[in-house]
Image (cartoon, rainbow, N blue to C red):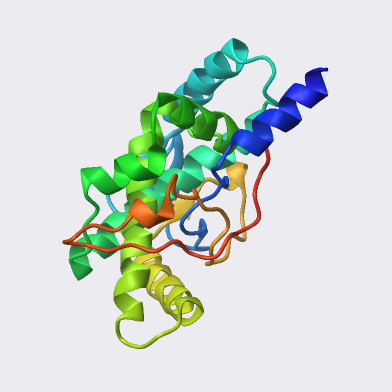
């Protein structure tokens, strides 16, 4: 019966677990600051912040025992990945006038129950959901902007990946070797909008990117 409940939960969940851009580890980019999980420009994600996010998620998993729990290693990777997503896309957005409205972010995340399912499935701490959705919306807006120049969605995604790679290099993105190495640019995960037809706004339209491999809850 428990596996049946899990399967039903998966079918009800409309979100594909995902990240908007990949992590990138740049070799030889300087000494890693003590206690840092990752660095982007003058910003750093500390190991204690990652631990706090894992603790936050552990409490959520404990309150939802029928949900398959991601491992601590997966939760750590998710925390670092989404933080870097946000840093790289924020820098790119500032340089290219890419906006993400509160309405668009709310449409990605949906109501409280949907937000909980995203946290449980994607391994994103509830306190970090808004920033993760902001990164995704910025990505989608940037893809849509490139498509207005005549590129297909696939071409636009490829072009944006190259530009985000450049932004990551300019920021000097570094990841503590304890948490992985050899990351390459490219989409790894994606949060699917609750309702893609409602994701556009008069000011800034957005469009979903092709589905990517999911980490199932």
For the view shown, which residue lies furthest in the top direction?
63
Which residue corresponds to the image point at 46% horizontal and 22% vertical from the top-left?
52
Q: Position of residue 25 (x, y in %)?
A: 52, 58
Residue 61 is left or right of residue 131, and the answer is right
> Is 82 above or below relative to 1?
below
For the view shown, which residue lies furthest in the bottom direction?
150
Q: Position of residue 139 (x, y in %)?
A: 37, 61
Q: Is residue 117 visible?
A: yes
Which residue corresponds to the image point at 39% horizontal and 29% vertical from the top-left?
111
Residue 179 is left or right of residue 46, and the answer is right
Residue 145 is left or right of residue 154, and the answer is left
Relative depth, front residue between 212 and 91 = 212
Q: Position of residue 188 (x, y in %)?
A: 58, 57
Q: Quadrant of the N terminus?
A: top right
Which residue corresponds to the image point at 39% horizontal and 53% vertical from the top-left?
136
Q: Is residue 217 visible?
A: no
Relative depth, front residue between 51 and 192 = 192
Q: How many numbered badges does the structure rendering display?
A: 0
Which residue corresponds to the image point at 74% horizontal and 32% vertical from the top-left?
7
Relative depth, front residue between 199 and 82 = 199
For the view shown, which residue lies furthest in the front direction?
197
Q: Position of residue 89 (x, y in %)?
A: 33, 58
Quadrant in which residue 45 is drawn? top left
Relative depth, front residue between 45 and 137 = 137
Q: Quadrant of the C terminus?
A: top right
């Amino acid at each position: 019966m428990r596996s049946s409940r899990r399967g039903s939960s998966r079918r009800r969940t409309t979100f594909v677990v995902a990240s908007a851009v990949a992590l990138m580890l740049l070799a030889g980019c300087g000494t890693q600051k003590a206690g840092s999980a990752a660095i982007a420009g003058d910003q750093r994600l500390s190991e204690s912040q990652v631990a706090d996010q894992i603790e936050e998620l552990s409490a959520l998993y404990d309150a939802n025992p029928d949900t398959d729990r991601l491992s601590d290693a997966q939760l750590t990777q998710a925390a670092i990945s989404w933080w870097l997503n946000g840093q790289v896309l924020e820098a790119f957005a500032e340089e290219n006038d890419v906006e993400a409205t509160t309405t668009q972010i709310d449409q990605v995340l949906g109501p409280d129950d949907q937000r909980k399912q995203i946290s449980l499935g994607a391994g994103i701490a509830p306190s970090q959901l808004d920033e993760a959705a902001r990164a995704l919306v910025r990505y989608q807006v940037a893809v849509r902007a490139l498509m207005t120049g005549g590129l297909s969605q696939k071409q636009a995604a490829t072009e944006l990946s190259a530009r985000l790679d450049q932004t990551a290099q300019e920021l000097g993105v570094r990841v503590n070797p304890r948490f992985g190495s050899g990351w390459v640019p490219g989409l790894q995960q994606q949060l699917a909008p609750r309702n893609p037809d409602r994701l556009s706004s008069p000011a800034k339209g957005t469009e979903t990117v092709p589905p990517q491999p999911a980490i199932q809850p």
